[in-house]
Structure formats: structure tokens, C-alpha cells
Image (cartoon, rainbow, N blue to C red):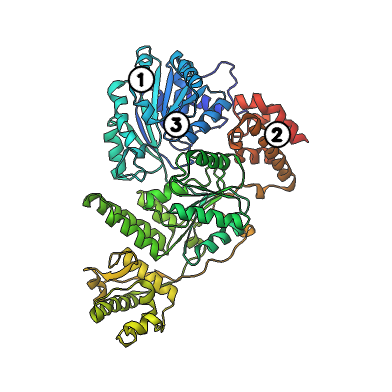
Amino acid sequence: MSAHPSSSAPSSEPLALLQEVFGYPAFRGQQQAIVERVTEGGDALVLMPTGGGKSLCYQIPAIARHRRGQGVAVVVSPLIALMHDQVGALEEAGVHAAFLNSTLELAEAQRVEREMMSGRLVLLYAAPERITTPRFLAQLDSLHERGLLSLFAIDEAHCVSQWGHDFRAEYLGLSVLHERYPDVPRIALTATADEHTRADIVERLRLEDAELFVSSFDRPNIRYRVVEKDNPRAQLLRFVQDEHEGEAGVVYCQSRRKVEETAEFLTAQGILALPYHAGLDAAMRQRHQDRFLREEGLVMVATIAFGMGIDKPDVRFVAHLDLPKNIESYYQETGRAGRDGLAAEAWMAYGLADVVNQRRMIDESPATEDFKRVQRSKLEALLALAEAHDCRRVRLLDYFGEASRPCGNCDNCLNPPATWDATEAARKALSCIYRFHQNNRQRFGAGHLIDVLRGKRTDKVAQYGHDALSTWAIGADVSEAQWRGVLRQLVALGYVVAEGEYGTLALTDSARSVLKGEVRLLLRQPSEAPRRGKASRGTRVGVPRNGPADLEPDAQQRFAALKAWRSEVAREHNLPAYVVFNDATLIEMARENPDSLEALAGITGVGAKKLEAYGREILRVLES
């Protein structure tokens, strides 16, 4: 059955548009309710995970309202790369769209403005700082007076909140849209927002009358894995080489220096990797981002300056070499993997130094105590996720208020860790820290503490006479890795504080409850993650991988031929390959092997314009 309406007259009905323009047979989840709400003129606040189809929630209403003669939809987007990709994809699908940003020459910007003011444009993408300028607002006034302003879509809406993980001051001015155009529907969208952030979005964007749509935060195709740091570069290299060789990925690091060193390391090991951080000049950042979007199998090593709005669907992994600030950041960053719905992985290495650094950044920030308190609680939630010995997905979804069952697709579900009662060990560690201070009024870091607890004779032990302490060697039966886990938890839970440049350890008042045995610590046994190759990579129970590796040999050949054809088309059109067709669509073509235009129209992702533009070429590729 064809995925497109049989009527030759273009429809403005949402489902017909979904099928005709985008080639999808049906809406997912809450998409239809959101689309109908905005199409009929209502406001909406949408929380939907990355890869959940947020853009369709405003693109289809924009097309529908334009076909009803209601003019131009204005999309607030904070990133140039996202504007380029979204506009390219819409034009490929036959929807007249454009952007206004600093990359345009004057003549081109003027041409776009003429298209906007005429009402011929369906969607216009622009940054918040441009939209709130007097000149642009005057243009919107003119469109509004003529009934040609169809809707406002505010993407990445969490940027308006001081509680969010990516606050941007320029978003604060967007309340002007409600004040000047109260009858124009607005839709605000974000992938992550806790209660504080949601309340801020509603208040600051004046969305009191908006209907709230909260989709499931579950990304079932992403496998979550956390490992304890032990030579993290080597761990990252094993992860990429063993499990994601030749695949696109993002590696997040906290500092610019670490980004560059990690990119150099991976490149030296034969992995195509590029650095990205705010310290690079704008032209280089743009070049690296363009290469990441257009080339296959490239790894971007970046600070959090990279990623928001990156619309690349075939990112197969996101790796963290440093602990993010909170679960929102972790969820947002890991959500950049597997946007096409195929199997992907979120891998993180973390250690005691990460806990110490994040706590120090919060404590030393100039923020108010209320803000710091919220940030500490958010960090503690992330640490609980990292240290968990039960299902990570259950913990992650619970943070966003969503109940779930063990997933079968995280490291703890696939390889349940052994646990041990670390209560007595914790008491020994706290006692030793106390003895250091009592002995010579000095503080020491984790490494020296572990040496004393395990009875390891070093120059520092001899220098300070710590082999004479009553706590000398009382933890010799506990491994170094176990001790690191104990100290991580004691710092994470606030019983110990690490201070100064060297992270020297001191007790807090709450440590008394542990020393008295009133607190029980059950920790996961540290273990080296098994070395696994691509062949052994599994998938979540009940979630098919549906990747190229699952195709029959003939279908794999067809998939390879389709990818080669897609690359040629992408180069000719100067677009990322996935804008032409994403991998999931090519895989379905290769598997189904359609032999007619009517059969090809039934493939998910083949809209009417693309069928007309590429249908016969695709059939030729499949026949060859």
C-alpha cells in the first residue's frame, strides 16, 4: 500500500502531510496530539527525547497553516549548523524553507527577507538574538498585520532557564513574541527539563496557557555503560576499536587541552578524529563540524560547546571521558547517539577525581547558595546513576519521573555486578583521615590514604611516620580499586570533602553517622569490562537492531550500492548524506527491494517529492 494520499490536490490535514511530505505512515506517541493542537492555533510546551521527532511537531503545523493561507512560521534556533541541516532537509522534501544568519551575504539575506515578507516562505529559521532586534520585529509586525505570521517554534527551550544545563541570556527576550503577537500560536520544545526548568520555561516565555506534552524519556536503542577510570585513554581506544570501528561518534572531555590531546591520541592510533572546543577559531570549528556531518566514520572529540542541535542521525556512540555536571547534561549529550533508532551506545569512564572536580566547581562558583544546593543534589543523582548496581535505565527514567522495568540493555542488566558491604571499610577510611589530622594537623590525598590503609611503604609514609598510626594496614585485605570506590562514595555522599589543588581529604560533620555504624554502604565490586568485539554486541530485549549487519548478503550488497549512490547525490547537492535519506530508510529499501515506484512509495522516509526526484534512480541502483 502506498504511503501517500491518492488525491492529486495537496492536503493540509496533518496525517496526509506526514505521509505526503515526509513519507511516514503514522505519527508516533504524542506527535499527532501536539500537531493538531498547534495547527488549530493552540500553544504547546513539548518535552520529547532527542530522536523522538520534535521537529515534525512544528514543521507539519507550519506546512498545514501555510496551505491554509496563514503565512510564515518562524523557528527560533540557537545554532547555525542546525538551521542549515533543517532547511536542507525541508527543501529536499519539497517544503520552501530558509534561514537568516551571519553566514549569508547581504544579497542572499535580502532575497530571503523578500521571500519571507511575501508570505511564500513556509518556515524561516533564525537565532534568538536576531528575532528580538527592532528591525526583525518590525518585519514580523508587517507580516502579522497582513495575517501572514502562522506560528513561532522555540527550539531548545531549556536555554531560557537558569536551572537548565545550557542557559543562554538571549532567550530571555523571547517573551516579546507573546506580548506583541498574542494570537499567534507558539510551541516550545526541549529534550530535557526537570520541574525547575519547566517552571522557568512557562514563566519566562509566557506559556501559561500552553498544553504540556511530556513524552517517554526512554531511548531503548541506546545501551548505557559506565566503567571506572583506569588508564582512560586506553579504555576509550579499546571501546572504539573493539565495538565501533569505522563508525561515527562523539567523545566529550571537560577541558580544551584534554580535547586536543585525546583527538591527537586517537588519530595516532588510526582513528579519524577531530577536536572541537570554544578556543578554536570559528572557521576551524565550522570546518570540523561540517566534516563530522558530511563524512562517515568520523569521531568528534569535544567539550560541551559541541552538540546541541546536531541533527546527525547515524552517531553510533557517545563517550564521556569526564563526568558531566548532572543527569540532564548526561541525557542530552548521550541522546545524540542513535537518532535513527538503530543500536547505539553511551559509554562513560569516571573516577574519584571527577567527583572532586565537579564538587569543587559548584562550591567555588559565584552562584547563590540556593542554586549551589540544587546543583549539588543534581550531581548526587548523577553519581548515584554512575555507582548503581541495578538497572541504569530505571534510575535514569526515574529521575525524570517515569516508572520503568529493568531494560536488558545496560551493562548492569547484561552483566549484573557483584556487590560488597563497604560499611566497615568506610569507617576505616574515615578513621584514617581523622588520625592524619590528629597526628600532625595535616591533610593528604586519596592516593596516600590508600597506601596507608593497605600498608604500602612509600617515601611519604616514612617521611610522616604514618606506619606508626593505629590505622596502618588495617585495610590490607581490600583492593586498591575497591578503596577508590569507597572514597568516591564517601565524597559523593558528602561524608568527606576534597579540598585545594591536590584534593586533600577532610571529614565533614555528617561523617559521624558513618563512624558510628548508622549508615550502610553497599557498593559494586570493581571489575574490568570484558573485551568484546562487534560480533558480540547485543541489543535491548524486544528491540531489533535492524542494522546493516542483520541484512542478508544480497541485501547488504544493495545497501552498499545505495550508500554509494546517496554519497554522490549528497556531494552534488552539498548536503550531508542523511539529509538525502537516512540509513534506516536505505536499510529498509535494501531489505524490501521494491521493484516499482508504488512499492518504493511504501518505504518509510520516502515522501512524494523525493519519490519524484529519486525514485527511478533508486530502482536502477536496486536492479544493478
| Residue identifier under label 3 | 57
Q: Which of 526 and 100 is in front in this view?
A: 100
Query: What residue lies at 49% left-to-right and 67% top-to-bottom?
Result: 230
For the residue carrying disc 2, how many other residues have a C-alpha within 10 Å: few (<14), some (14-19), or many (20+)?
Answer: some
The mark that comes first in sequence, 2 or 3, is 3
Query: What residue lies at 32% left-to-right and 20% top-to-bottom?
Result: 183
Q: Is mark 3 on a helix, strand or loop?
A: helix
Relative to 176, 312 lies left or right: right
Residue 135's tag is: 1
Query: What residue lies at 35% left-to-right and 70% top-to-bottom?
Result: 487
Q: In this view, does 235 lie above or below 30?
A: below
Q: In which quarter of the image is residue 476?
A: bottom left
Q: Is residue 326 above or below residue 491?
A: above
Does residue 533 appear in this view?
A: yes
In this rendering, the label closer to the viewer, 3 or 1: 1
Q: What element carries label 2?
A: loop
* Percent position of residue 439, x then y: 25, 81
The mark that comes first in sequence, 2 or 1, is 1
| Residue identifier under label 2 | 594
Number of numbered discs overlaid on the protein picture? 3
* Percent position of residue 81, x then y: 49, 35
In this rendering, the label closer to the viewer, 2 or 1: 1
Give the Cα separation between the discs numbered 2 and 3.
30 Å
Q: Nearer the viewer, residue 259 or 351?
A: 259
Does residue 540 appear in this view?
A: no
Identify residue type, mark 1. Answer: Arg
Relative to 100, 576 lies left or right: right
Q: Is mark 1 on a helix, strand or loop?
A: helix
- Please state, as top left, top right, bottom left or bottom right, where the N terminus lies in the image: top right
